[in-house]
Image (cartoon, rainbow, N blue to C red):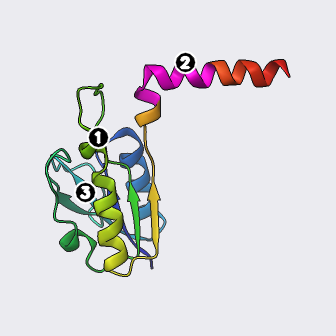
Amino acid sequence: MTRILVTGASGFVGRALAAELADAGHSVRAAMRLPADIFPRSVEVIAVSDLTRPVEWRPLLRDIDTVVHLAGTAHAGPAIAERVYDRVNRLASAAKTMGIRHLVFMSSIRAQSAAGIRQNSARDRRAAAD
């Protein structure tokens, strides 16, 4: 049985993923800012502070084989400092230190960037014209 930490477990993707992983027989630790009773009893729910502040990842990673990192700074604009977005590096570093060999990182940062959307759209149009 794989032991999986899912961050952002209360979000749209995280909620569905944590439930599906538990239904498939995996041991799931669901990390979320505001714990709620939304999962089967087999899912371990853990409170994690707002990711704009430092998080001590090691206790959350204890006895974990795989991390699926879905948590992030959502609905934010350019006023958010780069260091806030870089906090995922601390999770990856802590996972490596703990011997975790699999980390899946999903980000919506590009989807939130108007400049990125315009840049991608222009590139897609050029590719379609070729």
22 shown above or below 119: below
Mark 1 vs mark 2: which is more N-terminal? Answer: 1
Instruction: Indicate the position of residue 29 as horizontal and vertical percent values.
Output: 29, 65
Q: Secondary structure at mark 2?
A: helix
Q: CA distance from mark 1 to mark 2?
A: 21 Å
Instruction: Name the residue tied to disc 3.
Output: 31
Quadrant in the rendering for residue 58: bottom left
Q: Is residue 64 visible?
A: no
Instruction: Give the residue type that dot 2 points to.
Output: Arg
Residue stretch rendered in magenta on the structure: 111-121
Instruction: Give the residue type that dot 3 points to.
Output: Ala
Prevailing SS of the magenta stretch: helix
Q: CA distance from mark 3 to mark 1?
A: 23 Å
Name the residue located 44 percent from the left edge and 19 percent from the top edge: 114
27 shown above or below 82: below
Q: Secondary structure at mark 3?
A: strand
45 shown above or below 77: below
> Which class describes the residues within 10 Å of circle 3: few (<14), some (14-19), or many (20+)?
many
Instruction: Indicate the position of residue 68 as horizontal and vertical percent values.
Output: 41, 59
Instruction: Indicate the position of residue 35 as horizontal and vertical percent values.
Output: 16, 50
Instruction: Name the residue tied to disc 1.
Output: 82
> Which class describes the residues within 10 Å of circle 2: few (<14), some (14-19), or many (20+)?
few
Instruction: Name the residue tied to disc 2.
Output: 118
Instruction: Indicate the position of residue 118 as horizontal and vertical percent values.
Output: 54, 18
Contact (Cβ within 8 Å) of mark 3 with mark 1: no
Of tags 1 and 2, which is closer to the observer?
1
Instruction: Give the residue type that dot 1 points to.
Output: Glu
Q: Is residue 88 visible?
A: yes
